Amino acid sequence: MQDRRRQGDACGPRGCIVQTVVRQGTGLRCHEGCAGMTGYGTSYGAISVMNAIPCGIGSTIGISLRTEAVFEPSDSTTVELIDRPDTDDTLVRTCVQRTLDWIGQKTGYRLTVRTDIPPSMGLKSSSSVCNAVISAVLDHYRVRKDRLEVIKLGVECAKECKVTITGAFDDACGCHLGGLVVTDNRDNRILLKKPVPRYDVVIIVPDKMIPKNKVPVDRYKEFSSEYEKMVPTIGDSYLKVLTKNGEAVGSIVDDGGIAKKAMALGALAAGVTGTGPAVAIIAEEGQGHRIAKKLGRVSIMTTTRSEIAFQFDEVKGKVDVPPSKSYTHRAILMSALSRGRCVISNPLDSFDTRATMDAVRAMGAEVIADSGKITIDSTNLHAPDRTIDVLNSGTTMRLMTGIASLFDVPITITGDESIRKRPMKSLLDALEGCGVRCISDEGKAPLTIKGPISGSEIRIDGSISSQFVSSMLMMAPLVGRPVDIIVEGNQVSKPYVEITVSMMKSFGVEVQRTGSGFHVEPQQYRPCDYTVPSDFSSAAFPLVAGGLGGSVTVEGLDMEDPQGDKRIVDILRDCGCDVKIENGTITCSRKGRPKALDIDLSDIPDLFPIIAVLLSTADGTSHLYGAPQLRFKESDRIASVERMLRSLGADITGTDDGCIINGVERLKGGRIEHLGDHRLFMSAAIASLISDGFVSMDNDGCWNVSYPGFVDKMLQIVQR
C-alpha cells in the first residue's frame, strides 16, 4: 500500500479509524459500462479559501460536486462530455495522452466524462476533470500511482492547455484530496492539509461565465501584501480568510452583495470563489437550505466531505443492529392507507424512511416521530398536495408510484441524481396497461402519475425489482374491484414480496396466491400498532466481521422472520465459520480461511457486497450469480464491488448477474470509491479486517441510510 503519510494524511495505530480529509454529500453514480477492463476515475469540486493569484499561495476546501470519467481502449478515439457536447475537449484529450505517455502505452480510446460541476464558475471544474481522467486511464491499466503524482500531472496538462493562471495546484489538491489545503503554487508544494467539520455549502451561480483571458491579473496583484499576512492564519481561521478573500475578489468581480446578505442570514463564511462569478456560502449543517431560500437565488446545495480510513486487526464483542428499513417503509405507508391512528414501534430512523414519512405527510397524514416511535394519524388522507421528493430512497419512489395511481389527479414524484437514473419503465408499463396516465423521462424519474386504475388485471415484470410487485400489491385492495396481479419473468427477491404480504395481513388485508401471482379482493387497511423487527441485512456486516476477524455476537434477531437476508447465517456456516444461535442472539467466530462457495443471489441481492468481501480471501474459486438487478441499485453494484475489491488486491471478475472470485491470501488495502452506496461503504470497512493496509474512502455518512451508528458500533468491538 502507498505510504499515506507522504500525502499529509494522519495515520494511527492498527485497529483504528482515522479521520483525514474533507468533502461531503452525494454524488454521481457509476453508469453501465464500468465493469471488466473499463477504467474508472473520479474527483470532486472545491471552493477557494484564498486565491493564489496575489502572492502565489492558495487555499481550497473540497466539496462534494463530482466528476467521473470512464476510459476504455478502442480502435478509434472518441470523447463524450455528457450534457456538454459543445465543450472543448482539448484538456481531456491532453490528459489522456500525457497519462498514456507516462506509463508507456499507446492506444485509441473511448472516454466518457460526466460532471455536476458548472464550468468557468470558480468551482475547479478543470482540475476535477484532469484528476478524474488521469485516474481512469491508470485504473484501466491497473497502475497504482500516488494521488499527488496524479495531481501534478493534471496541473501540467492544465498549464499546457492554458486553462489556469497560477497552475491551479491548490485547486487540484482541494478536488482530489479534499479537506482544507494550503499550497505554494510556485513550486507545487502542500504547506498544510487538515480535515474540517461537516458543513453545508451553498453555491450561488450567476448566468455569466468568466473567460480566463479576461481575468484582471494586475488587480489581484494589488492585494499581495494583504494576502501574505493572511497565510499564517489560514489553518485556524480559514472561515475568516475565505470571507476576506471573498471581499477582495468581490471588489473586482461584483457579486451583487450576495456574500454580505448570506453573512447577515447566519452564514459562517461567504465569498466569491476562484475568480468568480460563483459565490460560495458555508453554513452549519442543516442551515444551508434556509439561507438559500432567504436569498431567493438559484443555487446548488452541497456539503463538505471527509475521508475516513479503516484498519481493524480483530473484533470481539456484542452489538445490536438497527430495525429493518424495508419493514419501516411499508409500515409507514400501510399506516397512512389505514385512514386511522397507528403507532409504529422500533422504526428505523434514516434519510430514506424520513423521505417516506414526508411522502405520507404530503397526503395529509399527521406524522410524529419521537422516542423510538412513529405515530401516524391518516384520518384526513387525500391526494398529495405537492411534488413528492423521495431524495435517494428507491423504495419510497417505487411504492409511492403504485399508491399515486389510486388518485384521479396528477401526482409528481422525483428524487436526487441517483434516483433519476433508476429504471421505472416496467412499473409504469403495468400501470399504463390499466388506464393510468404516466409521464416520465424515458422511463425514469421525474414521474407524473394520474389515476385511477380502470382494469382488473395487472401484468408486472418481476425480474427487475421485487418492489414493483410490492407496489402493485399495496395499492390493489383499494382499487374498488377484485384485482389479479400477474407476475411475469423470473421474480427476484421473493422474500421481500413475502414481507409485503405478511405486513398487509397485519393491517387487515388478505392476499391470495395464485399460480401466476396474486389475487386481491377490495378491502380496507385497518389501523394497528406495529413493531418493526431487527434487520438481517444490517446484521450481516458485524457477523461477517466476526467470521473474518474474531468473534461477534448480534442481539435481537428472530430466525423465524421472513427476511431473506437471514440466509447470511447459513452462508457463514457453509464457508467454515463457527455460528451459534441461542435465545435471539447469533454469534459468529473465525475458524481459519473461509471456504469458496457458489451462491445464488436472486433472493438476497443486498448481501452481495458483504458476501463478496467474505469470499475474497476464500480458499478456491467462488461464483456469485442470479442477481442482474444489482446493476440498478444505488450504484451499479456489480461494477462497484468489482472495482472496490480489485483496488484492494482481490481477484474478482464481474458478470452479468454477479461475479467470479478467485480467493487470495490477504487484501492489501487502498483507497476505494463507494459512490455514496451505503452497502459498499460498510463492506469496505469490514474488508479492512483482511487487509494489510488502511482501507480509505470518502466519509459522507451514507451508512446512515440503513445502519445509523455503524462506525461507532464497529469501534465498540475493535480490539486495540
Image (cartoon, rainbow, N blue to C red):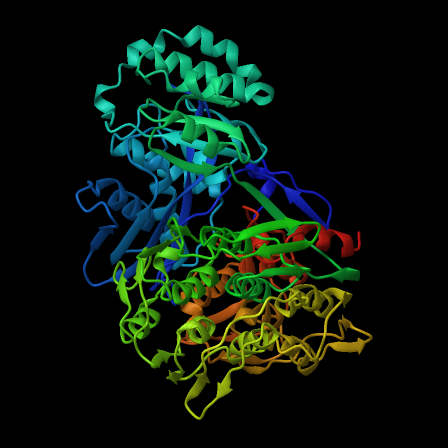
Residue drawn 42% across and 37% down? Answer: 301
Tell whether 195 sits left or right of 484.
right
Q: Considering depth in this image, is 467 or 471 the residue closer to the camera?
A: 471
Q: Considering depth in this image, is 169 or 706 the residue closer to the camera?
A: 706
Tell whether 70 sits left or right of 79.
right
Residue drawn 51% across and 41% down? Answer: 24
Could you say where residue 491 lies in the image, as x and y percent from the top left? 44, 82
Tell whether 128 sits left or right of 584.
left
Tell whether 280 sits left or right of 574.
left
Q: Considering depth in this image, is 175 or 322 the residue closer to the camera?
A: 322
Could you say where residue 246 lies in the image, as x and y percent from the top left? 41, 17
Q: Considering depth in this image, is 668 or 256 the residue closer to the camera?
A: 256
Question: In the image, is residue 656 above or below residue 285?
Answer: below
Residue drawn 52% across and 32% down? Answer: 287
Say which quarter of the image contains residue 117.
top left
Total residue callouts: 0
* Farthest bottom residue in view: 515
Question: In the image, is residue 5 above or below residue 566?
Answer: above
- Residue 55: tell me if it is visible: no
Could you say where residue 700 lies in the image, as x and y percent from the top left? 54, 46
- Residue 370: tell me if it is visible: yes
Question: In the image, is residue 493 above or below residue 352?
Answer: below
Residue drawn 72% across and 54% down? Answer: 713
Could you say where residue 179 lies in the image, as x and y percent from the top left? 53, 34
